[in-house]
Image (cartoon, rainbow, N blue to C red):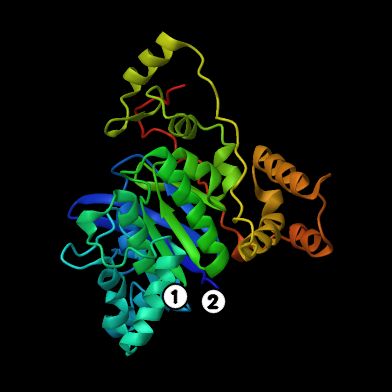
Amino acid sequence: MTGVEVKVEGLTKSFGRATIWSDVTLTLPPGEISVLLGPSGTGKSVFLKSLIGLLKPEKGSIVIHDTDLVRCSESTLYELRKLFGVLFQDGALFGSMNLFDNIAFPLREHTKMSEAQVRDVVMEKMDLVGLKGDERKLPGEISGGMRKRAGLARALVLDPEIILFDEPDSGLDPVRTAYLNQLIIDLNAQTDSTFLIVTHDINTAQTVPDNIGMLYRKHLAMFGPREVLLTSDDPVVAQFLNGRRQGPIGMSEEKDAAQAQREMAEIGELEGLPPMKPQLAATAGLPDRQAVHRRRERVMRMLPTLPPAAQAAIRESYAHEGGGTATLTRDEVAGASVHDARTETFARPDNLFEPPPGRQRSR
């Protein structure tokens, strides 16, 4: 099984007169891991729900297998949803069902498998997430981390081509989050599905994804290879990745310009971005992530269009992997010489981090 490309263009979602985000355009490359960051309340979970058709955007398109989820019929949408597996924030387990029945629920609802077949699949997925032997326990009898893993096992039972993670690290301590991050990498190596993770955890954003996006001020501020955001000199990105109070982001997403200036005057020059961390690799003994090889070809094709700092970080990472200077293959050179916009996932409109008219940008 190989993940599928998800192409989002011009997506806009509102609740009444309140616009959550508008004109969101990105492409989730097949089989790769993407992360969506952003301050609380920017509509990241709303974006996930829109992707699977639980919420209907007012404008734009979501194309999977040449079908637009925004405009397709209910019967077509029902079938397309089977391509998705979703890990919700709290696991969303049925409290009255044991773990086995929770994980078996999608199979009993959407397939005609016999109970023997259901048991085989459920036990396989429980073993995959480290829950073998816990199938008879109720959700209230296990830890938060185990509930997350049970929810993940349920998301995997239909062998989805796309897996969405809505803040998988919420409520977990740093050690359990680290274990979960490694599990996500290992699952991607074994399934080659397309992953999209919504998270606030900076370590997850630094070590897990192939691509990173950021929602801010009701727009997708940027989306592209991980190196683009992790080397960005934008003050919004620096504030978020450093997890500090001083900067453009306030409690209500955007800080008053005067307050931001006062804070900067008090503390002077702030440190830049935290050091880049290497991306996690699959656990020894598991197959290599096929997405890594596809990503290298794709990123090298778009390399000339990326910011210089991102280009340097990409070349350095590939040089480190190869033990020497990063070089392009013949196909990569050909791809880099003529940039194909269809393969590009980097997007950063220049004005999205700028303040609205009448306000000054804090420095």
Residue 357 against residue 76 in the figure, above or below:
above
Q: Residue at x 60, y 38 (%)?
A: 277
Left or right: residue 112 compared with residue 295: left
Measuring from the top left, give residue 332's x and y in whole percent.
77, 60
Measuring from the top left, give residue 223's x and y in whole percent.
51, 50
> Residue 111 lies in what quarter of the image?
bottom left
Residue 258 against residue 14 in the figure, above or below:
above
Measuring from the top left, give residue 181's x and y in whole percent.
48, 50
Q: Nearer the viewer, residue 204 or 68?
A: 204
Measuring from the top left, give residue 224's x and y in whole percent.
55, 51
Question: Decide: marks 2, 1 in contact (CB < 8 A)?
Answer: yes
Tag 1 or tag 2, which sits nearer the N-term? 2
> Residue 354 lies in what quarter of the image?
top left
The residue that label 2 is drawn on is 1
Q: Can you tell which mark lies on residue 159?
A: 1
Q: Residue at x 39, y 67 (%)?
A: 126
Q: Which quadrant would the N terminus be assigned to in this image? A: bottom right
Tag 2's secondary structure?
A: loop
Three-letter residue code for mark 2: Met
Q: Residue at x 25, y 62 (%)?
A: 137
